[in-house]
Amino acid sequence: MDSKRRLMVTAVNSGQSQSALARHGGTLHHIGIGRTHARTPVVLLIADLDITIINAATGEILRQLILGPTRDYQPTGRPPGPAHTRNDNGPTFP
């Protein structure tokens, strides 16, 4: 690992929002973690622009990303709205 690399660990509660906050270069960046993880205590492991978001209670990795310093909000990459499920049971009408 490069000795000039900046490492940081931050514990946050995502609150009612669906994002965590990280500061880079004096600017706050919102990192989307999704509605499923709203109000979840998380730990952010930050190494320069590499960020890993971990559920503080279970240790589950919720998200890994490379911070885009020109964007204020880092989207999850998923399409908006609920996840679509596939119905393999055939039609549900009579």
Image: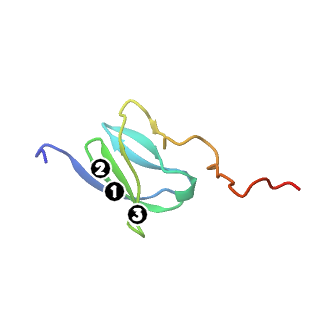
Q: Amino acid at mark 3?
A: Glu
Q: Amino acid at mark 2?
A: Ile
Q: Which residue is mark 3?
A: 60
Which of these two is toward me, 6 or 60?
A: 60
Query: Which percent across, then down, holds residue 39?
Result: 53, 60
The circle drawn on residue 10 is: 1
Tell me if 63 is positioned left or right of 16 in this view: left
Disc 2 on helix, strand or loop? strand
Tell which residue pokes out farthest to the right in this image: 94
Q: Residues within 10 Å of mark 3 (few under 14, many from 20)?
A: few
Q: Residue at x 69, y 54 (%)?
A: 87
- Of tags 1 and 2, the one toward the viewer is 2
Q: Mark 3 or mark 2: which comes first in sequence? A: 2
Per the model, the C-alpha gap separating discs 1 and 2 is 8 Å
Indicate the quadrant where residue 88 lies.
Answer: bottom right
Relative to 70, does residue 74 appear above or below in the rendering? Answer: below
The structure's colour scheme is rainbow
Q: Amino acid at mark 1?
A: Thr
Q: Residues within 10 Å of mark 1 (few under 14, many from 20)?
A: few
Marks 1/2 in contact by CB < 8 Å: the verdict is yes
Q: Residue at x 56, y 57 (%)?
A: 36
Q: Mark 1 or mark 2: which comes first in sequence? A: 1
